[in-house]
Image (cartoon, rainbow, N blue to C red):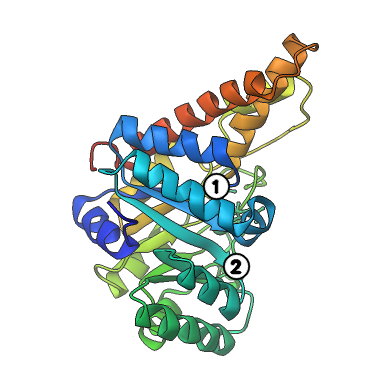
Amino acid sequence: MPLVGTREMFKQAYDGGYAVGAFNVNNMELLQAIADAGHEERAPLILQVSSGARKYARREYLTHLVRAAVETYPDLPIALHLDHGDTFELCQACVDDGFSSVMIDASHFPFDENVALTKKVVEYAHRHNVPVEAELGALTSTSDEPGAREAVYTDPDEAKKFVELTGIDSLAISIGTSHGAYKFKGEPTLDFPRLERIQALLPGFPIVLHGASSVPKNLVDICNAYGGKLPGTRGVPEEFLARASKMAVCKVNVDTDLRIALTGAIRKVFAESPSEFDPRKYLGPARDAVREVVRGKVRLFGCAGKA
Ligand code: G3H
Ligand code: 13P
Ligand code: ZN
């Protein structure tokens, strides 16, 4: 099976009341871990590549590694997505490279400029039948005060207008998630009423949740037990993600949890076997740890068993 577009995946996810996991790929071990987990759990997968990943692993290597995963699991629906594309040229290059989905992230620009750049990407990508994700709102958590939230979270009316003006296929929104391992200052909260309003204004339209790692204590503890320094981490509680996945959220982005799992497993080998220098002896357990995390995620998002 060739790469699958996200349009088909999202239609099924929306109708089925689940979300597809989107996992960041930077190297072979991460890719194998994600693909193996998808295969074991019979879960559709979105493999996503950031501009940094593309520079690190180099575009030819990444493209061929992803092709190898698709050939290894020909029955598994796999999409290849550009994560946080920041220029028209990068989106164009990824469309030309055969990506089956791209994101243009112009959310840091004023509304009109965000619309203009997003529209330009949509025009190009749609000519090649590639769906486009864009973002509206600033990805950060803030206090409960309505004024504070209005300043950064996605405005539902603007979201509707943005979708109509740009012709995008999915929208990343801000309702309190953020990237990395330190997501909340106080108690974690997501603005579910806002998500409900967006869903009501855009019925049937796929919503994307970035910054959705849960930063699980057990993974952080492994890192810290073997020399890591990750104090006071805070992720998105799993029950929030399960709830959002049943709503309009069709894509849930996870990178940080994979990084922490990988790093913890490597730290453990280094600490317990300081004379070990065969990379397979620490990258192997690291790959296993990432695979188990991805298996847990796809079950949580409800996409296990859907492929
Ligand atoms: O949202 C960002 C992803 O975690 C990718 O991060 O730009 O460091 O590859 P990166
Ligand atoms: P996390 O940092 O929460 O894993 O989010 C990843 C992400 O949104 C990638 O686009
Ligand atoms: Zn993101």
**Relative horizontal placement of residue 152, taking residue 154 as reference (left or right):** right
As helix, strand or loop, the secondary structure at mark 1 comes to loop
Q: Quadrant of residue 150?
A: bottom right
Would you place residue 248 above or below residue 283 in this image? Answer: below
| Ligand 3 closer than 8 Å to label 2 CB | no
User: Are the residues tagged 1 and 2 within 8 Å (C-beta)?
Assistant: no
Residue at (64% x, 50% y) in the render: 57
Mark 1 crowd level (few <14, some 14–19, many ≥20, 10 Å Cα): many
Indicate the position of residue 198 as horizontal and vertical percent values: 36, 69
Would you place residue 158 above or below residue 154 in this image? Answer: below
Ligand 1 quadrant assignment: bottom right
Mark 2 crowd level (few <14, some 14–19, many ≥20, 10 Å Cα): some
* Residue sitting nearer the eye, 298 or 193: 298
Disc 1 marks which residue? 25
**Relative horizontal placement of residue 264, taking residue 236 as reference (left or right):** right
Indicate the position of residue 147 as horizontal and vertical percent values: 59, 70
Residue at (44% x, 63% y) in the render: 99
Residue 154 seen in the figure? no
Q: Disc 2 residue type? A: Ala
Residue sitting at the far left? 15
Q: Nearer the viewer, mark 1 or mark 2?
A: 1
Indicate the position of residue 88 as horizontal and vertical percent values: 57, 80
What is the tally of numbered marks visible in this picture? 2
* Residue sitting nearer the eye, 260 or 290: 290
* Residue sitting nearer the eye, 51 or 229: 51
**Alpha carbon of mark 1 to alpha carbon of mark 2: how far?**
24 Å
Q: Disc 1 residue type? A: Val
Indicate the position of residue 136 as horizontal and vertical percent values: 51, 73
Would you place residue 241 above or below residue 137 in this image? Answer: above
Disc 2 marks which residue? 138
Residue at (47% x, 30% y) in the render: 291
The C terminus appears in which quarter of the rendering? top left
